[in-house]
Amino acid sequence: MSCDQCREREAVIHLTQIVNEQVTTLHLCERCAAEKGVESPGSAVKTPLGSFLAAMGKGPEQTPSARSADTCHRCGATFQDFRESGRLGCPDCYRTFETPLRDLLRRLHGSTHHLGERYAEREASAEEAREKVADLREQLRLAVETENFELAAELRDRLKVME
Amino acid sequence: MIDLSLLADGGVGWLDASGPSSHLVLSTRIRLARNLASHVFQGRCSETAREEILQVVESAARESVLLRRATRYRIDRLDRMDRQLLHERHLVSKELAGLEGEGRVRSGASVLIQDRIGVMLNEEDHLRIQGLHSGFALDQTYAEVDRLDTELGQRLAFAFHPEFGYLTSCPTNVGTGLRASVLIHLPGLVLTKEISKVLQGLAQVGLTHRGLYGEGSEVVGMFFQLSNQTTLGSSEQELLDHLGKMVRQVMDYEEQARQVLLRDAPTVIEDKVWRAYGLLRYARSLSFDEAMNLLSGVRLGVGVGLITDVAMYTLNKLLIYSQPAHLAVAEGISPDDADLPLRRAQFVRKVLESEVGRRG
């Protein structure tokens, strides 16, 4: 939804006020909220994604790490796209942007580990998983051969999770 | 014009005030966000991809037990009034109904509904499996939604990550994909001015609040939707238990606030309640917001036993049927018609009159 004030940017702060028993809710974007002086700790808690994304757009975190500059091989989304829209492009983006996302998930949810129900993969997807493992092994072999140890370490971690 | 009579109880079974604690809690809603592993997320989907998603999920639904007889609405092929009608009935989100901002509907936007459960398709995520119950009923609602999730999950390949869980278009929903909301009426806390403290407290324990229609909606008539903020790092049951525990606490606070009001300011409360009732019985023109606020006052009156001849169910019905699209459809006029406030007042008068006649 768009900001009540400028009607342009996405509203990330939802301020509920009670004046004379009338409850009103104001939806503001980060900039208009700052202009209005709305920076209560409550609003920050309510919109952790918005404030996180805003925080990433300024200050020392501005220089994107090499990792976050990557483009998702499957859907073509960049981390900048995610920063602007707040939406990821496809399931594979979670692997492509794993490092910055892990940081974000920790801030949003206080954890990165799913503890809920595990999805019982179907026969077909088990087959896909086997293919993926074979593919990762091949990539790992190449990475070791070309002495790209950083990539190799990551591939090894991913294989460990899958196997 | 869509035919809502195709739905069992017209899709408003959740209004019947039969559920637990229904004098305070109108309804309990739970949704699970799911995406197909085979397709990119909504923001990058082509029209063709959305049609494919629709076909794949609909065929899985036809093979399922829980959605075999589902009624299906192609939201993208409905006119604005019908879309608004479904939204006012709390059957589809504002986003899916294309009622946000410029009012564009995403191609392929659809909903399948069978009894108290259903699936929104081509919402922010490919699937939003949802369940809606009357009153405070987290466990029953989740049991049904979980069964549907299992059934569909056997026929579809969902995007799932070993560490992050179910993958969603927005990282705020990742993990369980579960959002549980309880729609609760809190006039006691608003009138005693305790509500801000309570809402702040809830934010500190990871819960969030919204208005009558969920995400991005205004708080009207002192109705609040309380729901979990986080979806990752706790199991479904832990999320539900935590929300349930906090809602029970809020209900206790609300009951206490009502007792304080009745003890310390009985005449003020009586005056407020009866004024609201009087206006609803006799006013000749009512805006939607005014009607909501007055219904809220009467609801408080019924809750504390000051008004005895109006049923909660009647108030719930008035809440739904005095909304713009519902009223316009019933009266056969446009939702922008200048006569709407007059028709609303007339409708409310008629319902309350017959209620008192029947009971008295």
Image (cartoon, coloured by chain):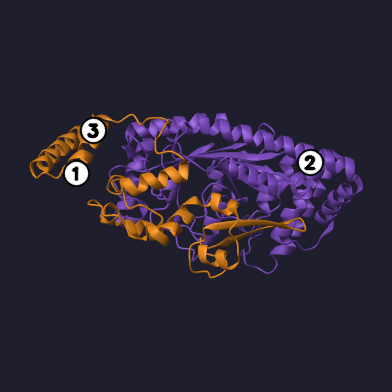
Chain colours: A orange, B purple
Q: Are marks 1 and 3 on the same chain?
A: yes
C-alpha span from label 1 to label 3: 29 Å
Residue B245 location, x and y as percent? 62, 32
The answer to whether residue B215 is seen in the rendering is no
Distance from the alpha carbon under mark 3 to that under mark 2 = 57 Å
Residue depth check, mark 1 versus mark 2: number of the one nearer the observer: 1
> Which of these two is toward me, A13 or B101?
A13
Q: Which residue, given by chain and number where applicable, does mark 3 sit on? A: A124
Camera-nearest label, 3 or 2: 2
Say which residue label 2 marks. B257
Q: Is residue B121 above or below residue A86?
A: above
Image quarter of the C terminus of chain B: top right
Residue at 67 percent across and 42 percent down: it is: B184
Q: Do we see residue B225 in this rendering?
A: yes
Indicate left or right for A40 with B342 as reference. left
Label 1 vs label 2: CA separation? 60 Å
Pointer 1 or 3: first along the chain: 3
Q: Amino acid at mark 2?
A: Ala
Helix, strand or loop for disc 3 = helix
Q: Quadrant of residue A15?
A: bottom right
- Tag 1 residue: A151
Q: Amino acid at mark 1?
A: Leu
